[in-house]
Image (spheres, rainbow, N blue to C red):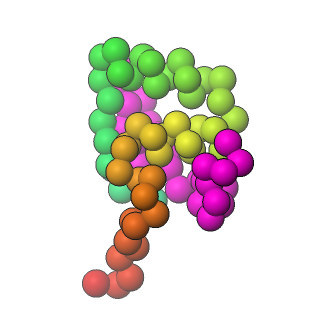
Amino acid sequence: MKNVDKRNKLEEEIFSYKVSKDDKIFIFWEGKQVKILKGKESKKFLSKISTAGTIESQLIMAKVTGNFKRGNEKINKGR
């Protein structure tokens, strides 16, 4: 797992998630909602994340969102 995060972005805890009452998972990147999981997908996510550490949790959320692994994510700077 050491070679996965060469720029140490996952240590910054840029991803977070929230579970709703109806078991939907809302995944956020830098405070912006980027993905919603429901059904089997949300149960699978919860089982993985429940035993994961901080950096591993960040990696799981990055993989689930899909497009956040290329390093080309842009940060909006006051536009």
Residue 47 position, x and y percent, is 53, 18
Relative height, residue 5 to residue 78 (above, below): above
Q: What count of labels does the image hold?
A: 0
The residue most toward the bottom is 78
Q: Which of 19 and 57 is in front in this view?
A: 57
- In-image side of 29 versus 10 (left or right): left
The quarter of the picture where the N terminus appears is top right
The residue most toward the front is 3
Q: In front here: 60 or 76? A: 60
Q: Where is residue 55 in the image (x, y as percent from the top left)?
A: 66, 44
Residue 60 lies left or right of residue 2; in this view the side is left
Is residue 54 something one can see in this rendering? no
40 left or right, relative to 57 = left
Q: Is residue 5 magenta?
A: yes
The structure residue drawn at horizontal position 65% and vertical position 30%, both measured from the top left corner, is: 52
> If the image is split into quadrants, where does the C terminus sit?
bottom left
Q: Can residue 55 be seen from the camera position used here? A: yes
The stretch drawn in magenta includes residue 16? yes
The magenta segment is: 1-29
Image height of 60 relative to 33, above or below: above
55 shown above or below 73: above
Residue 65: x and y, percent?
A: 37, 43
What's the residue at 45%, 53% (across, down)? 69
